[in-house]
Image: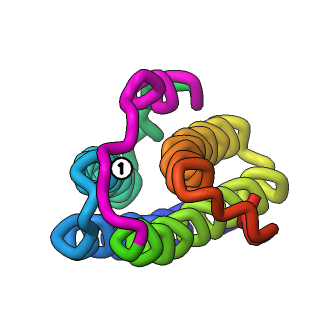
Amino acid sequence: MYDVLKLAELAEKFEIEGYKFYTSKKQEVKNKSVAEVFEYLAQMEKEHTEFIRNLMKSLEEGGEIPEIPNQSASYFKSRYEEQKISETSPEDDITDLSVLRMAYLIEKDFIEFYGKAAEKETNEKVKSILTILRDWEEGHKKIIEEQIKAIIERNNLELGFYPF
């Protein structure tokens, strides 16, 4: 079992860094739909941060661990499932692909962090929260995967470096 407050503090830092990454990178990418995905993901990371802060406040005040909504990975994937990647030059696609791969790895790290913490946690409520946070990040990863696949397929870049 972890010190829940320390775990929440670390999770908060991860979510803040995710927010900063998406906020800064949405200005750099050339493809409009990739920028929109990053805007959406920045908002989600901000919401995660707010939840974690509320959790920490509740814990510090000796309160109960709050419930959080269980949003499945399909919730996030469906948000962009119909969206087609807009046309950009192959050069811009390669630049955007590099940024998307960084985003993918960030989300993958978050998934591993929350997943491993959940596996080791003995408090069922804390375990449930960690599992839901992991699932949220899994949803983010799936959105990014779709963008990566679209760029690779559109530009015939079957180079064998899918990160997934």
Q: Quadrant of residue 126?
A: top right
Q: Quadrant of the N terminus?
A: bottom right
Residue 144 x %, y %: 51, 51
- Residue 129 lies left or right of residue 51; in this view the side is right
Q: Is residue 104 magenta?
A: no
Query: Height in image: 141 above or below 83?
Result: below
Query: Height in image: 16 above or below 153?
Result: below
Foreground residue, 13 or 64?
A: 13
Residue visible at 51% across and 55% down? 151
Query: Height in image: 31 above or below 37?
Result: below
Q: 10 Å neighbourhood of mark 1: few (<14), some, or many (≥20)?
A: many
Residue visible at 55% across and 39% down? 139
Q: Quadrant of the C terminus?
A: bottom right
Residue visible at 41% across and 34% down? 66
Q: How is the image coloured?
A: rainbow
The residue carrying mark 1 is 48
- Residue 108 lies left or right of residue 133; in this view the side is right
Q: Quadrant of residue 120?
A: bottom right
- Residue 42 lies left or right of residue 75; in this view the side is left
Foreground residue, 38 or 159?
A: 159
- Residue 100 lies left or right of residue 115; in this view the side is left
Residue 145 x %, y %: 59, 49
Residue 79 x %, y %: 39, 26
Visible residue check, residue 141:
no
Circle 1 SS class = helix
Residue visible at 38% across and 43% down? 85
Q: Is residue 89 magenta?
A: yes
Visible residue check, residue 143:
yes
Query: Height in image: 51 above or below 159?
Result: above
Q: Which residues are magenta?
A: 73-90
Say what amino acid the circle numbered 1 marks.
Answer: His
